[in-house]
């Protein structure tokens, strides 16, 4: 795609007139199936029919029908009375991850960067008011927060989030900030919308973001954009560290040049594909 | 769960008599929705309605109905005539990953192991005749094959696959081997069923597997099981390397002790949860 893309789904999707929209019952059935999948998590890896019905807000009969469908398709397995997800579920996310234009290009560059600075390196994309981690190269040190592919963080108070917000048109930025739950997660967190817009304008101008303990006490990070050939921000790449080991000022001095070099290298490679 | 689990979905799932099974049309609709998601990949990250209909074997009308549903649920976005997946898709796989009993426990141990041996370290689980990567800590070196979470490899000719096969009851092992496409991927690949059973029996007896270029020329690896408290094999952990850097014999001498220590450490931690 050489032309600028919009992420807003509209009638221009070639989906035809409103009369052709899928019936509510169909949409609802599909949504319920997906909500059953999402009822499983670290606290509830295996659940009974009754527990799943409660977690997903379905009747027992409705949950049973969906579970049998998911078992039939191989996405859920039954161990006695307990149901659990199967690894086939990963095929769905894998379809997304391999769809990204920096798939297979970014990781070797991230690995080199991570070894250079001895800190973790991640790439994320924007989804509404949140960022979603799509690639990560961990450093050996134990982090205070454990983030892996699929993890989410609020955009307004994270370095990658602000880089991604800086890539939005003004009206869209305003909409996302107004939809965000702007809470002071530490005593440093900027929560005022006008102050945030100024911070984001500065990031847009200089091309990178720092985060000095606005997300969590002790957590510092630097982020830069990954762009396509048209210059649009597709994703953000960051290095995160701990303030008691590396101050924000030290991070900027030592880690910013290799981070910017990595983000440019990935953007150039993406440019060959987009 | 303290009792041994079976992965075969049967009537014991508490799902009621056959009369309560979901209608074929419902199952088919759900399956089609998921097949549309899986129509996206590295070669086809953005597709038109016509392309998606072709890739998923649906009519244009059917594909349109499902795409509108997926757009409505936020899993697909429309850019002009093109559709693409959104990062929300990752929530589904994330539900699975965080459901694993070694979630958050294994990664720090894998990172330490990877830094110790300067090679990549991965964890995978069995899905039918294939293994699926669920965790991975890459080393900086460029691998000949690029594997990330969700990647699949055949079980019969990979070190982790054979460790996972060694954890199956005999009848199930036989069934999986007979369902496998036993091809000679290199001149070293064992493809005879009886010979494979002997290799797998040896792995069961000694508790680890080596793979000396049976999957791909130049690729060597070692794998060991991760078990729950009842001793069942839940997953396999491996170290992979390149034959021109480290021979299989050197891997066994230098990498096997830290690999076995890591697999035991993870199994012990899992035992506290299962």
Image (cartoon, coloured by chain):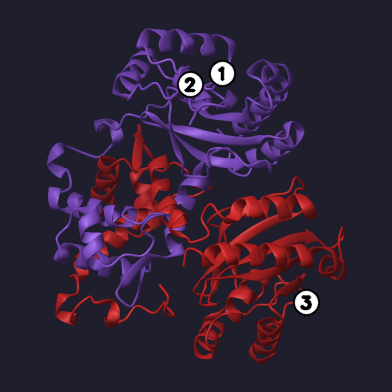
Chain colours: A purple, B red
The chain holding disc 1 is: A
Residue B116: % across, % down: 78, 53
A50 vs B79, left or right, is left
| The disc label shown at residue B75, or none | none
Foreground residue among A16 and A268: A268
Looking at the rendered structure, which numbered label has been put on residue A209? Answer: 1
Q: Give the chain letter at badge 2.
A: A
Label 2 in the same subunit as label 1: yes
Secondary structure beneath label 3: loop
Q: Given contact means CB atoms under 8 Å apart, are the residues at marks 2 and 1 in contact? A: yes
Image coordinates of residue B132 in percent, x first then y, are 54, 63
Q: Which residue is mark 3?
A: B188
Q: Position of residue A40 (x, y in %)?
A: 35, 57
Which chain does the numbered disc 3 sit on?
A: B
Spatial CA distance of label 3 from label 1 is: 51 Å
Disc 1 on helix, strand or loop?
A: strand
């Amino acid at each position: 795609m050489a032309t600028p893309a919009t992420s807003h789904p509209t009638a221009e999707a070639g989906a035809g007139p409103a009369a052709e929209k899928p019936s509510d019952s169909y949409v609802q059935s599909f949504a319920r199936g997906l909500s059953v999948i999402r009822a499983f998590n670290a606290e509830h890896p295996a659940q009974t029919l009754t527990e799943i019905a409660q977690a997903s807000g379905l009747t027992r009969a409705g949950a049973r029908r969906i579970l049998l469908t998911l078992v039939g398709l191989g996405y859920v397995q039954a161990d006695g009375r307990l149901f659990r997800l199967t690894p086939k579920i990963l095929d769905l996310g894998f379809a997304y991850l391999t769809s990204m234009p920096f798939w297979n290009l970014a990781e070797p560059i991230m690995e080199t960067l991570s070894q250079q600075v001895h800190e973790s390196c991640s790439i994320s994309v924007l989804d509404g008011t949140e960022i979603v981690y799509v690639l990560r190269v961990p450093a050996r040190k134990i982090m205070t927060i454990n983030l892996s592919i699929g993890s989410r963080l609020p955009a307004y108070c994270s370095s990658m989030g602000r880089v991604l917000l800086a890539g939005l048109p003004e009206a869209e930025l305003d909409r996302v900030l107004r939809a965000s739950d702007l809470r002071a997660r530490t005593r440093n967190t900027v929560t005022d919308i006008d102050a945030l817009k100024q911070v984001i304008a500065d990031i847009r101008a200089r091309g990178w973001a720092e985060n000095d303990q606005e997300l969590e006490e002790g957590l510092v990070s630097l982020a830069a954009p990954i762009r396509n050939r048209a210059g649009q921000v597709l994703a953000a790449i960051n290095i995160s560290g701990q303030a008691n080991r590396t101050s924000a000022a030290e991070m900027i001095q030592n880690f910013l040049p290799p981070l910017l070099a990595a983000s440019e290298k990935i953007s150039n490679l993406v440019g060959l594909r987009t």
